[in-house]
Image: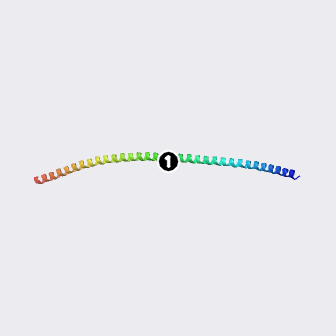
């Protein structure tokens, strides 16, 4: 009697153990699934972050290049204006020098006429 009741008890424990094992396998499956989903999400986030970083760096380089181009254009325009003003200044300086020479010549002629006029008196 004791042997058959022990056997029945062991069978019952075996069934409980199988049931527990199945439950643990289900939990393990969900844990693995959760883990895989988390890894996938983290990988996607890492990929997105890398893509955003590369896009940001590309945009920065484009803006830097554009700024550099604009700066070079402005520098060229400013140098052109400086050369233009220098040339204009040179023309004005030449004109002033010519006018000064003419004025000096007129003054000399007037002085000479005054001296000549004084001599006739």
In front: 92, or 68? 68
Name the residue at 81% across, 51% down: 13
Q: How many marks?
A: 1
Colouring of the image: rainbow
Q: Quadrant of the C terminus?
A: bottom left
- Where residue 6 appears, as percent x and y from the top left, is 84, 52
Residue that badge 1 annotates: 60
In front: 26, or 48? 26
- Where residue 119 appears, as percent x and y from the top left, is 10, 53
- Where residue 116 appears, as percent x and y from the top left, is 12, 52
Task: State the residue lying farthest toward the left.
Answer: 120
Name the residue at 24% across, 49% down: 97
Name the residue at 20% across, 51% down: 104
Left or right of 14, for residue 82: left
Name the residue at 74% across, 50% down: 24
Left or right of 76, for residue 105: left
Left or right of 7, for residue 36: left
Q: Give the quadrant of residue 73.
A: top left
In front: 59, or 87? 59
Mark 1 surroundings within 10 Å by alpha-carbon count, few (fewer than 14), some (14 through 19), many (20 or more): few
Left or right of 11, for residue 27: left
Query: What element does badge 1 sit on?
Result: helix
In front: 45, or 75? 45
- Where residue 72 appears, as percent x and y from the top left, is 41, 46
């Amino acid at each position: 009697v004791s042997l058959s009741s022990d056997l029945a008890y062991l069978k019952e424990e075996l069934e409980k153990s199988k049931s527990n094992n199945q439950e643990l396998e289900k939990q393990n499956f969900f844990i693995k699934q959760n883990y895989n989903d988390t890894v996938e999400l983290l990988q996607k986030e890492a990929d997105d972050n890398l893509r955003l970083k590369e896009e940001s760096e590309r945009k920065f380089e484009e803006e830097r290049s554009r700024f550099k181009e604009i700066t070079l254009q402005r520098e060229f325009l400013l140098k052109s204006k400086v050369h233009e003003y220098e040339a204009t200044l040179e023309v004005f300086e030449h004109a002033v020098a010519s006018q000064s020479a003419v004025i000096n010549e007129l003054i000399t002629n007037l002085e000479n006429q005054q001296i000549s006029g004084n001599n006739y008196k």
